[in-house]
Image (cartoon, rainbow, N blue to C red):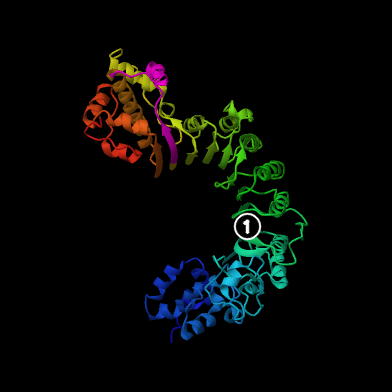
Amino acid sequence: MPASRISIFDIPLVVEAICDHLTTKDIWRCYRVNKSWSDLFSPHRCKHIQFLDLDSTQTWYILNNAHHIRELKVDLADATDLLNSSCTRLEKLSCVNFGYMTWPSTVHQDEWALDFTPRWIDLEPSINALSLIKMNPRLRELNILWYPAIGIPVRPFTPTVLSALSSHRFLRSMSISLRSTHKELVALLTHCPPHLEELELQCKVSYPFGEEGQHIPLVLSGPTNLRCLIVRDTFIRDQPNIFSTLLKYCPLLEKVELPQAEGSTYRDFINILVEHCPKLQSFHQGMTHSLIASSDAARLLNGYPNGLREVKLNVYISDGDPTSRSQEGLMRPLAAYYFNVLEVLRLQVRMGPISARIVSLLGLCPRLRVLEVIGNITMLDEIVSKERWKVLMARLDGAIDSTADAQTELLPWVCSRLESLMLHIAKPSIKRIGTVMLQKHPMTEDAIEEVSISTIFQAGLFCQTLKSLRCLTNLELTWEASIVEAVGMIPYDRGSLYMERVGLPRVSQKDMLWMGIEWSTVTDR
């Protein structure tokens, strides 16, 4: 009898290697091909598992094939079955709150919610999902989300778990959202895996009764491998000191995102970053109530002459700050060092008219993808080309032919990759009638119409430039009422004729509405 042919699917290791490169959806598709493939791929359907609301049959099937699980989402306090299984090949572990843990019968839930020094529950190793860390030496990503509005304070980071973390060689990313104590936070940072590259923390820190006066410093044995550090929520008490120490041990840090803090705290952070984190490429500041002085922001920007790719700042300019008299403090490093590397700039400015200069980056930064300026006013005639606008007004007056001076045609911004733009735009400054407007003298009908025509031309030039940006997907423009009123003084049909007369491509009502201006076919006057 001829020897039977052996297929590669007869070799379990080959099938397993194939499934490691397939998504869950692809594995299910293979499972449905025929009976033979159904038997072959059935165990590998357990690649991504959410251990929630399972009947006995499903539970038995998953536990029987636990060695095939690569990504697991499980309740932090309900991992008994998995801890007694062959779940030893995890690559991603997500520990969440499915609500399996009940409140102690002796304590009412409202009492815990109002208790500022709650009693903490130590998770037993037999139910603690973090005990899976020791069982899975090839775990690469750990996520913990136990942060309900009213939650049971638990202590999952037992000495055994911390020991497993500190010796883990493959763990590269940790994201932890957990109610914690100051002592536990220090212990966690002290026992971070040696090769950890990404750390995200949102820890509401409490000081249990008996620990209020304890100030435990963070002591690290040597430099970390962190490349990304994200800290959310708000700093309280000793937290700034903890993270200031941590930053001093992050020479490879490329991205940092810090939460709300006092201005002096951010000044210390900036000095530490400039001195100890030379590879930084992205700086994100909490954009709520925390403010950085413009001089400190300039210190940050000047501290990285090779440029940061992403910058998110909440800046204030005080009367005593020399930057309030000169916009060069922030603009000089941006224009000198950052023009060829800057990709994202989110800027919230208080008490300082620097937005107009910031907008000039649109013509300087070819890699710019996001520009969002909040809290400042940008003049419309500072966005568009002044030379082009003057030519259009001269054409309207008949001073030059509409086909002349082709070299003044508006060129697209160099930021051809721009995806998001957010600006607050104010009325244009028209020099020939500026004196009349400033002195609040009555304006003639001709002067009013000139303001309207000029505004329409500038809005048309702006729209023409925006339409040339093929990657632009998010546009949020806030217009001052004077611009909307000026556009509304001339109906769309007549305004379109003015555009054709000066050789400006016609802008449709839909285009104007896309920018946030409703241009009616009937005059608003």
Residue 307 falls in image quadrant: top right
Vertical placement of residue 3 versus 346, above or below: below
The spot of residue 89 in percent (x, y) is 59, 72
Q: Determine the secondary structure under disc 1.
A: strand
Q: Is residue 384 left or right of residue 301?
A: left
Farthest bottom residue in view: 1
Tell me where the magenta segment starts and ends, as one range.
Answer: 421-444
In this picture, is 202 found above or below 272?
below
Name the image quarter holding residue 483: top left
Is 91 situated above or below 477?
A: below
Q: Give how far across and how far down residue 323 sits, in percent.
A: 61, 29
- Residue at image coords 49%, 78%: 43
Q: Is residue 439 magenta?
A: yes
* Quadrant of the snapshot with the N terminus: bottom left
Q: Residue furthest top?
A: 399
Q: Nearer the viewer, residue 261 or 65?
A: 261
Q: Residue at x 39, y 26 (%)?
A: 428
Q: Amino acid at mark 1?
A: Leu
Q: Nearer the viewer, residue 18 or 276?
A: 276
The answer to if 406 sits in the magenta stretch is no
